[in-house]
Each structure stands twice: as structure tokens, then as C-alpha cells.
Amino acid sequence: MKDSMNRRQFILAAGALAGSAVLAGCGGSSTSSSSTSTSTDSSSNAASSSSDDSYTLVKNGTLTVVAELGFAPFEYMNDKTGDPEGFDVDVINAVADKMGLQCEYLPNQKFDTLVPLIKQGGKADVSIAAITITDEREESVDFSEPYLDSNQAIVAIKGSTETEETLNDASKQVVCQGGTTGNDWITENLPNATCVPVDDVTAALTGVQTGLYNAMVVDLPVAKYMLTNSFSDLDIIEEIATGEQYGIAISKDNPNLTKAVNKALEDMKSDGTMDSIETKWFGSTI
Ligand code: ARG
């Protein structure tokens, strides 16, 4: 069954994070459940004949993925199927496919818990969640080679006269997803504004819509997608050229997994898989 191309196996491992304090808000337990499987039996995976190349997996034969699943078009829950979808979901499925593994998503986690969860180990093998590679995060985890370039955007209500300058004022509420690079950008560049970190991007944008917040700072591709699909009364008032790059976060204790993921990404770039995923989600390669 590993050979079937594009096969998606999103078995939500409901309960896999039992005992963790971050279960609130976990997405629907799903269609196919593998709740009986234990996710803690680390087993050595013979990635090739040379034992030097071996990496460990939380669950044998499976790439266990953790993400914050409210970041369209990169990762979001399909309400009908109860499965994660998006650019990153396609990327990590193709990576798993190249590695001869199945792909399994854990229930939704808050964004700022993802890097700590990978660092801590034992629950998930990788996190792919439009995570910007930063020096600070690289102290905790390893990243794959970058798989996509990105920037930030400032979003406000259509017709708003706000600018970066007017927002830098104590009377202004600027919302972001907590723990993101957008959060860092506000702290550094709008030191006088009131920065409001929240967990959920849709709630943040709704708050901008209703006037609760003056603006939001969020990744540009997400702003574009959300404004086109759900928030037509909002506008991108400024694009910020932060020059970010997304990478897949992997434990520092598992360097051969990072190598294997990099090899898969390289193959996907050279055989056109990456281009077709980009075209599917962005209409062109970016
Ligand atoms: N790229 C930004 C960062 O790394 C935002 C990522 C948010 N991702 C998500 N799935 N909510 O901080």
C-alpha cells in the first residue's frame, strides 16, 4: 500500500497526547481511529542497509506529524472529512511517501507548543506548520532545508487609514497568533502599540473585522488566502519583506531523520512534485 501515489492516510491519533496539558481545542476525533496504538514505542527504523543512516520513529512505519491546523492554505481541517488539508499536508505526505512511510497527524496543537513538543520528543517525529526557521528555534530543534519563502502582512478593515506609523501608538491594538514571527515583528517594530497574541487566526481576523483590533500581522500567503476566501471586507495595508523561510522541525536527537527528510524534499524538487503542490495551492510556482 505504500506504493499507491498520493495516498493520504490521516489517522487522527486521538488520545495520543493524553496527559498533555494542551488538549483543549483538539480537532474532531475522526473517521478512522487508531486510538489503541501506543505512540511511545520508539523503535529503530532501518532506513537503509547501513545502520548509520537509521533514525527513530514514534511509531514504526509511520511519520507522526504535529501541527496547528488553523493556518490555511498551509494546514486546516476539512470540516466534512475531519482530515487536515493544505500545502504543508501535501508536502509532508509526499515526504512520507518518498520515505516509504505512512503519514499520521496528531490532534491540533497550539502553535507555540509545536517546537517544545518536538524538542521534548516521544509524541511526534516532525512538525510542519509554516514554521519560520529562526535562530532562536534552531537552539531547540533542527530544521529541514527550507521548503518555501514567505513574508508578513499587516491586515486592517477595508478603507482603513492605518499605516505602520499610525499603528505604533498606545491606543492601537494589534493582534497576532501567539509565538509567531508576526508576534515578534510587532514587538520589535511597533513597540508603542498594544500587541495582542491569540491562539486562533480566524478569531484574530474576526476581531479586526468587528473593530476589536486595529490590525493583524500574519504571514502574507495566509493573509492573501483568508482575505480572498473568507474576509473580503479586510485589506492588506502593507506587505513586510521579512524574507522568512519555512522548514520542517525535527528533534536534534534524530539527525538521520532530518537527513532523510532533506533527501525526500530534494527528490520532490527535482521530480516536479514540489512544483505541482505549489501550483495546486498557489496557482503557480512561487
Ligand atoms: N511563519 C510563522 C512562524 O513561524 C507563523 C506560523 C504559524 N503556523 C501555524 N500553523 N499556525 O512563526
Image (cartoon, rainbow, N blue to C red):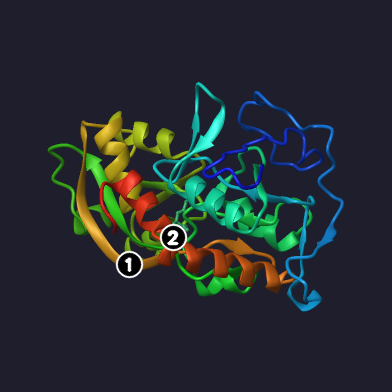
10 horizontally vs 239: left or right: right
Location of residue 204 by image quarter: top left
Residue at point 52%, 55% (across, down): 179
55 horizontally vs 188: left or right: right
| 235 in relation to 262, above or below | above
- Image quarter (top left, top right, bottom left or bottom right) of the N terminus: top right
Q: Is residue 170 in view from this perspective?
A: no
- Image quarter (top left, top right, bottom left or bottom right) of the C terminus: bottom left
| 38 in relation to 253, above or below | above
Please, what is the three-letter code of the amino acid marked with disc 1?
Thr
- From the viewer's side, name the closer residue of 274 and 110: 274
7 horizontally vs 232: left or right: right
Please, what is the three-letter code of the amino acid marked with disc 2?
Thr
Q: Is residue 89 in view from this perspective?
A: yes
Residue at point 50%, 50% (across, down): 178
Q: Which residue is mark 1?
A: 242
Residue at point 56%, 26% (across, down): 82
* Res 73 label: none
Picture coordinates of residue 51, whole percent (x, y): 81, 75
Picture coordinates of residue 151, whole percent (x, y): 32, 60
Within 8 Å: ligand 1 and the Cβ of disc 2? Answer: yes
Q: Secondary structure at mark 1?
A: strand
* Res 181 label: 2
